[in-house]
Structure formats: C-alpha cells, structure tokens
Amino acid sequence: MAFFLYLYLMRLTEDYILKHLENDFPVQIQLYDHGTHWELDKIVVPGGMRGIGIGSEVLTKIGEHADELGIPVFLTPSTSYGGTSIDRLRRFYQRFGFKKVFDHRDKALSKNMLVRHPQF
C-alpha cells in the first residue's frame, strides 16, 4: 500500500511540473518520473520563440525542482523536435549541468546519453 501511495505522490510531482511549466511558458514537455530519476524526452520551444531564453528558463526550473527532491535527470539530445544540431544541443544542455553518462549506476537507470545529478 505504501509503495502505491509513493507512486501516486510521484505522479503528482510530475503532473505539477508539466502543468506549471506548460502553463507558464510556451513549451511542450515530456518529463517522465521513474521514482529514482526523471527522463526528459521532449522539450519544444516554438520556432519563432527560440533564442530568447525560454528553454533556458524551463531547464533551470526543472533542475531546481530536481535538486530539491535529490533526483537525477536524464536526456538524449535529438533534432526530432526542431533542433539543428546534436552537438549544439549537447553544449546547450551542458550549460545546465548535464554530462555524458559514464557511471555504471547511471547506465543501469537509463539508456539516455546525458545526466544531470542533483546539485546541492
């Protein structure tokens, strides 16, 4: 019973993040809560609104909330949603603390390429 309550509460956290960020910023986000970590599968800033700091602000908010909860965030840069270059996206995410996954414990959690560990 306690495990299901934990899963329910984790779901509320995820829903809060998505609702709050998508209501406050013109973005589309797919952020999945796996209990021990989050996976950011999609963050899309509309084409005409790129380059003015919206994505940076959203990533900062995600990082701050993950830090509060002590949760690592995983992602894999992709040009599927309008990004122009994987290298450019990788450099962008590195500015927010994302690093290449090397540790075997991280590899056991996620098959994504980059991870941002909680920063205290």
Image (spheres, rainbow, N blue to C red):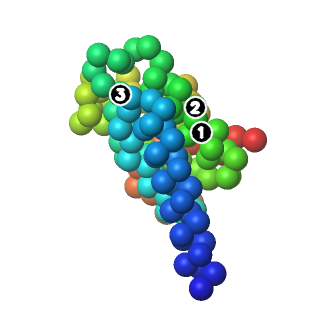
Q: Which element carries disc 1, helix, strand or loop?
A: helix
Between the C-alphas of marks 2 and 3, the distance is 14 Å
Residue 76 showing in the rendered view: no
- Res 119 quadrant in image: top right
Q: Could you tell me the amino acid type at mark 2?
A: Thr
57 lies left or right of 76:
right
* Mark 3 burial class by Cα count in 10 Å: few <14, some 14-19, many 20+: many
Question: Is residue 7 depicted above or below 83 in this figure?
Answer: below
- Marks 2,3: beta carbons within 8 A: no
Residue annotated with mark 1: 63
- Residue 20 coordinates in the image, percent (x, y): 51, 41
* Rendered view: 73 above or below 23: below
SS at badge 2: helix
Query: Can you give x and y, in whole percent of width and height, for residue 104 in the image?
Result: 54, 58
**Tags 1 and 3 touching, CB below 8 Å:** no
Residue 5 coordinates in the image, percent (x, y): 59, 75
Identify which residue is drawn at 70% across, 47% down. 68
Examine the rendered structure and indicate whether residue 22 appears above or below residue 83: below
Q: Quadrant of the N terminus?
A: bottom right
Q: Sequence-wise, which precedes: disc 1 or disc 3?
A: 3
* Residue furthest to the bottom: 1
At label 1, which amino acid type do we have?
Gly
Read off the residue under disc 2: 60
Label 2–label 1 contact, CB within 8 A: yes
**Residue shown at the point (38%, 32%) measured from the top left:** 27
Q: Which residue is mark 3?
A: 45
- The secondary element bearing badge 3 is classed as loop
